[in-house]
Amino acid sequence: MKPRLPLFLLILSIYCSQLIAAEGFNKTDSLNSAWNKIKNPKEKVDAILQFLEKPENQFLDDTKDYAKRAYDISQQSDYSRGKVNSMIKLGNCYYRSSDYNKAMEFAQKSKEMAEDMNYDKELANSFNLIGVIYSELGDYDNSSPYFFKALKLFEKLSDKEGIARSLGNIGLDFYDQQAYKKALEYLSNSLSIALSIDNQILIKKQYNNIADVYADQQKYDTAVVFFQKALIIEKKLGDKMGQGISIMNIGYIQMNEGNFKDAFLNFQQSLDIATELNNHLHMAKCYINLGYCYYGVKNIPASLTYFNKALLEGQKNGYYRVIAQSANMLNQMHTEKHDTLNAYKYVVLEKLAGDSLFAFQKQKLSSKLELQYLYEKKELKKQLAQQAKNIIMLIIIFSLIAGIFILGLVFSRHRLKSKLVLLETEKIKSELDIRDRELTVNLISLIKKNEMLADISGKLRQLEQNAKGVEAKESLSQISQELRNSTDDKMLNEFSRRFQEVHAGFYEKLLKAYPDLSQNELKLCAFLRLNMSTKDIAELTGQQLASIDKARYRLRKKLNLPSSETNLVTFLSQV
């Protein structure tokens, strides 16, 4: 009978898959059937949007198709409110799929239409969406104003749910910038309102966000309490994915505290949920955490198994961060075993994944600059169009009473002409600034690549020392030498030269006033002069956020800026 068991399990799994697929088709068919029975186009659009508003339906694979259907129907039936809400839904869908340009396109369209139609709630939701997109790109100068605009509108409407969402978004903005005190203040206020209206989705969301803030500060006891509170609600709501994430977060804290026994149980439970949901990214993260756990208890064979599983998932699905993390640990463990050949293989994999991650970050930064440019250009065009309308109206009015207001007309036209010249000048300056920033980012990208090559060269030298065979040592030495030769020491000088073309005399003025500044500190000054955030600098230089913060602190002391009231970026922009 034993040989028949695998066949039985195979048949059973196929049968279950067919049942699940059939269930999905049946659900879609029943939805389409229900919506097709609604004859009024506006009612049909509202029915689709109400379906998408339900928490359990917000992350369905068909969400974008449903939102597009609502958008098409509202366009055909000239249903403006439905069209605005459909565009907000589509913007959210594109945001979740990392298509930020498309997401911003729908967000801006919904904002403009909501403004024209005086739809305050929809306008506030558009503001929140625009803010979330900017925040994801690390552009906090643009994200925060939109979150506060949304908050102001929701307060005007006395919309408590909207207020809570906006406060939560502002809190996450502060969290991303490591302003933990402010983040907790806004997230706690959001949680209080969510509790007062008993909005379970918002409550568990803020529990998780607050837990993340405490975990970042290594206040693990408090973080676990909030993760557990979120987990209770996720179980109540039947939010399987949320449960898996919360359980994994709890396990991660237990592992950091050395409680490997409970961490193993939680990681395995989280893995079971991810496997049930067929969520490969979450499965890969569980494999990595289990690998760390086994490494922590010195079970190297089991650790290797799980890191290899994570690596396989990463390679199959293009999860470059997973590949880099897994390859790094596999390289470390094989190096410890003096397995030079395998260690080198994983060094190469880690390097390739790092290149892909760096390219993604560069693309993300380029998207940020492109969005800024397009937004500024669009706003300028809108202002010019409005001013053109005003000029035409003024000409018509003043032509009827030209004899009386001739002096006023001359003065007004002169003032409008000055404004147009000023706006055109600002437009040219803005375009030049963007080209300068793009040029600088490309140069910094090349510097980063050279630093990565130098790091790989160092690892190869380490492998060369551990290698046993003469041929292996010679090969590794040759590769290391080639990598060292490929690093271009002139790159930083090239960056400095280009930077001086844009900001002439910047280094000279700094060194004249503060001659003890080091080359690294001058480089940091240049980054800050370009108004780059701590997060952007960390991504470009490969340093930890904490290291950048320490460097900034030391720089403030050297520049004699002990007072926190004096902004470092503002100070450098005036040099």
Image (cartoon, rainbow, N blue to C red):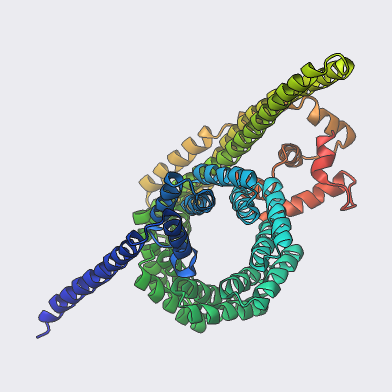
Front position in the image: 20 or 481: 20
Query: Does residue 45 sit above or below 442 in this rendering?
Result: below
Q: Residue 200: x percent and y percent?
A: 57, 76
Query: Does residue 356 sit above or below 411 in this rendering?
Result: below
Residue 49 shows up from this direction: yes
Query: Does residue 372 sit above or below 411 in this rendering?
Result: below
Q: Residue 191: x percent and y percent?
A: 67, 72
Quadrant for residue 400, please give it: top right
Identify the image quadrant of the N terminus.
bottom left
Q: Residue 268: x percent and y percent?
A: 42, 77
Quadrant for residue 387, please give it: top right
Identify the residue at horizontal 62%, vertical 68% (top origin): 209
Front position in the image: 551 or 281: 281
Drawn side of residue 161 relative to residue 405, left or right = left
Residue 496 shows up from this direction: no
Drawn side of residue 85 relative to residue 342, left or right = right
Identify the residue at horizontal 67%, vertical 57% (top origin): 173
Identify the residue at horizontal 33%, vertical 62% (top origin): 37
